[in-house]
Image (cartoon, rainbow, N blue to C red):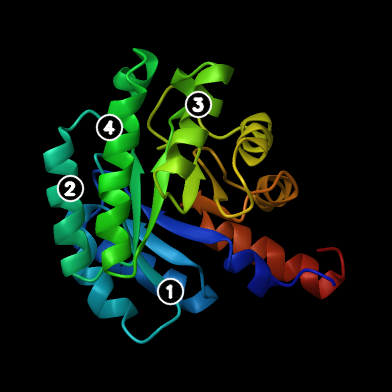
Amino acid sequence: MALTPKDIAAMLDHSTLQPWLTEADIRHGCEVALKYGTASVCARPCDVPILAAMLKGSSVKVCTVIGFPHGAHETAIKAAEAELAVKEGCQELDMVINIGKLKGGDEAYVEAEIREIAEIAHRSGAILKVILETCFLTEEEKVTACRLSERAGADFVKTSTGYGSAGCTIEDLKLMRKSVSEKVRIKGSGGIRDLDTVLAARAAGASRCGVSATEKIMEEAERRFREGTL
């Protein structure tokens, strides 16, 4: 079956995470997401009330980040952040793992933390995406993080915050897809700025991409669809 622009939009989490964004920018981001019908808007925690009001009644989900961007908050803080987010209307949570704990070999800590946030999300009918920040991990650590995430109840594993030393790679997406079962979905994020990269991520097994260049990507998708080249 041929791809449509709607299929592309359904893969996109429209990202509004830059620290300098104003309320007007966040509202514009919601308008862009509603125009194209993206999967979600992923915004900073302080912006969740804006998203909840603007996206209410639409198919676009309210998403925020937990422990962002370094993942080094204490678990109790991540849990409180998650509890408040779902109380304010969040339907999707993107949490950064404790990267140092993973690299130090404390798998029990990492798994327990993911499980706690997953349980908070699931109690409210929300989903959890676990951000690995792959640029800081070895191949073995990426595989371990994927397996811990699945065991702890994560719905997605996600490559990057976009604020590390590097972002999403197709190789990482392929590795992550092989490292979890079909129950767990894959999200690429960080440096995805054009339609070809979204399509390559899709081919590698990603079902979501975090992007801020949504308008550019969707305009290209619509043009190619009209030309029969999507």
Query: Compared with residue 134, is residue 160 higher up or lower down, i.e. above or below?
Result: below
Q: Position of residue 168 (x, y in %)?
A: 56, 35
Residue that badge 4 annotates? 71
Residues at marks 1 and 3, CA–CA distance in whole angstroms: 32 Å
**Lateral position of residue 100 relative to residue 153, left or right:** left
Instruction: Tell whether label 2 touches label 1 (CB within 8 Å).
Output: no
Residues at marks 1 and 2, CA–CA distance in whole angstroms: 24 Å
Residue that badge 2 annotates? 79
Task: Name the residue rendered at 29%, 69% in the picture.
Answer: 27
Local secondary structure at mark 3: helix
Amino acid found under the numbered disc labelled 1: Val
Residue that badge 3 annotates? 144
Label 1: how many residues lie within 10 Å, few (<14), some (14-19) or many (20+)?
A: many
Q: Position of residue 53 (x, y in %)?
A: 23, 79
Q: Position of residue 46 (x, y in %)?
A: 16, 56
Task: Name the residue rendered at 33%, 78% in the picture.
Answer: 55
Residues at marks 3 and 2, CA–CA distance in whole angstroms: 22 Å
